[in-house]
Each structure stands twice: as structure tokens, then as C-alpha cells.
Amino acid sequence: MTICIVCDVLGRENNGTTIAAMNLIRALRAKGHSVRIVCPDRERSGEPDCYIVPTLPLGPLNGYVRKNGVVIARPSRKVLEAALSGVDHVHLMLPFPVSCAMLRLARERGISVTAGFHCQAENFTSHIFMKDSRLVNRLVYKAFFRHCYRYVDAVHYPTEFIRKVFERYGGKTNAWVISNGVNRQFRPIPVSRPEELEGKYVILFIGRLSKEKSHRVLIDAAKQSRHAEELQLVFAGDGPLKEKLMKRGKALKNPPIFHFFSREELVKTINSADLYVHPAEIEIEAISCLEAISCGLVPVISDSPRSATRFFALGEQNLFHSNDSKALAERIDWWLEHPAEQEACSKAYLGYTKQFDFDACMDRMEQMILETHAAKHKEG
């Protein structure tokens, strides 16, 4: 099949949506499909099967978006029509302007369309300081449904949690719940801990340095830990809050390490850490957490009702009360002081994560696309 993947946001693989898009593109091509990409990433100009659309000016948000290492796309009918010519199926990554424009063109031509759900309302409303407004978040979901998801033939949800949230506020969809999957590269491997980390407890977080990830809670918890002088926080990622977090972290005996790791470096970093902490208040899935526990790293996860990641907890000690740094400090101390329980939990997670096997998840994504296309063709 010839499949067109529409990415309103693409660029450096430093956010969940871009990582999910590139993983899907690579997987479909490996399965023999011809995959076209529509995106605003000018660095891809000249690449085969890549169609570049203009960027969307966001006024005062331009600086914030640039700090995230991404740009947002603006529709170009000429580019979209060229990308759509001869295509069998379209998959949208986000319910944003370029995807909505491509959806209209595909529907006019009777082409099947699926869409991924990779953006919680709060991912948008946090930028306008309204992430805690239930009314505004509900209106965002309704807008996503009205302009995009009600018209597509099937919707991919990374978790059952986000399907229920969206269908409660948006509307009923033809839902496929499929994890974005964890690459087999993330597994336990023997590593030598860097000399500068010897004698320390290494606490790892992986992900964007943005407000909804609640990194401040982890930094404050490290201050309150009984092992504060031995703790070394490692933030694997990049984002707009990096400077603020670095400033906040200066109060620690061992200031946090901030670094954007390659995949190979990240696997080694995970395997050299003692605990993984995921304090995010808002999360659709958190592949980063799954990557960590796939290496056998024990997690401590926020119990936020707006985060799907809490469902990865195997026991009470894997959860802490959302935005409560004292509660997080107590959990961190408990695990560090109970090595036997930590080893048993690590082994349990190695079995648990088999359900998120990347190849199996990509098989399901291909199945969704093929079945959706076949059903559309049958209707025609």
C-alpha cells in the first residue's frame, strides 16, 4: 500500500508524538509499504516521499515552540494534493490544521483515513495557563472531535485511559487501543557506571522538560529524602523549562544532570540507574516509563487521575500522591532501603512489559490500517 502519514509536528525525536510517528513510519516501510510524510520539517527537504508544508506563525508562542525543538505546520493545498496523489490510505498524527485539511481532501476522494490520539487537552491548555480548567479542557476535546475525529474511519488510542477520556467529552469513535510499543533495544544489559556517579543513588526521569511533567516535584522530593546527600537526579530530555529546572536544582547537594541522550546512550543510562521516577501530572501513555521498566528499572509514578502512566504500577509502592514531594521522597527512600523488594519488583516488570513488544504493536497498527482501508473499499 501507499500510505501517507501527516505530521503537523515533527522534528527532533524529543517528544512522544514525533517518536511515535517516526517509529510507525519506519515500521510500515520495513513491512514493504510505501510511506509518504507530510510535515513542516525543512531539514527533510529533498528526502524521498517527504512533502514539506509551511510553518504556522504562533506569535508569542513561537519562542516556546522553538525551545521544544519543533515547529507546527500550516496547510498548503498544493503540497497536500501532491502528497495525496496515488495514495491508498492516510494516517493523521494530530487533530491540527494540516491534518484537518488533508482529512477533507481524502474524504472528497474516498480515501480511507485513520488518526492517532496523541494530544491531551492539557497538552494545549497548559501553554495558555488553563490546564486545570475542566470547562476549557472539555471544549478542546469537543473541538478535536468536531473538526477531526468524528470524520475519520478509525482512531488509534495508545491507552484505554485516553480513549475513555476523549469519548466522554468528544464523542464515540471506531477505536483501536494499541500501545506505541517499546523497541527491543530497551532491555537489561551489563553496564559500567560512570566514575562521577559511583557511590550515589541515581534517580532517572526521561521526557520533555515541560510544565505538565512536574519535574519540580522530583527536585523537591530529592531535597526531602533521607538520602539527599547521596542522590543524583538525571533528567534525560530537553524542553522549555530546562533553565528553570537547572536553577531549582542548584539547591541540591548534587545538582541534577540534564542531557539529551541518543537511543544507545539512553539504554546504558537506564541500566546504570537505581530508580525511575515519573512525576508527570498529564500523560497519555509515557513510552519513556515503559522503556525504563523494560530494562528492569523499578518505577515510582504519580497517581494523577490525568495520567495513564499510573496504570503501569504493579503495587502501592510504585505510586505516590500527585504533586506531593514529601510522599515521593518517602517512596524513593523506601525502595532504596529495601533492596530485596526492589530486585523482586524489577524481575516482575521484565515479565509485565512483554505486552508492549514493539513488533507486536506495529503489527496491530498495520492491521488497523489494512482493515480500515478494506472496509472503506468495500463501502465504495
Image: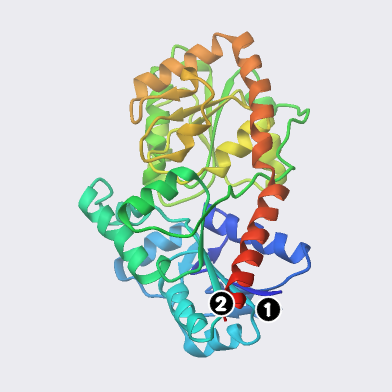
SS under mark 1: loop
Residue type at mark 2 is: Glu
For label 1, count other residues whose C-alpha is less than 10 Å away and answer few (under 14), some (14-19) or many (20+).
some
Q: Position of residue 181 (x, y in %)?
A: 63, 47
* Residue bearing the label numbered 2: 379
Quadrant containing the N terminus in the rendered view = bottom right
* Dot 1 amino acid type: Asp
| Residue designated by label 1 | 49
Q: Residues within 10 Å of mark 2 (few under 14, many from 20)?
A: few
Task: Choose between 128 and 258: the one closer to the eye.
Answer: 128
Can I make out residue 15 in this image?
Answer: no
Image vertical order of residue 163 relative to residue 150, above or below: above
- What residue lies at 35% left-to-right and 30% top-to-bottom? 322
State which tag comes first along the sequence, 2 or 1: 1
The figure's colour scheme reads rainbow
Of 307 and 233, which appears nearest the observer? 307
Q: Is residue 26 above or below residue 113?
A: above
Labelled pair 2, 1 in contact (Cβ < 8 Å): no
**Secondary structure under the numbered disc 2 in the rendered image:** helix
Q: Residue at x 57, y 9 (%)?
A: 338
What whole-number distance in Å separates the C-alpha atoms at marks 2 and 1? 29 Å
Q: Position of residue 202 (x, y in %)?
A: 58, 25
Name, please, the residue furthest toward the bottom.
78
Coordinates of residue 29 in the picture (x, y in percent)? 74, 66
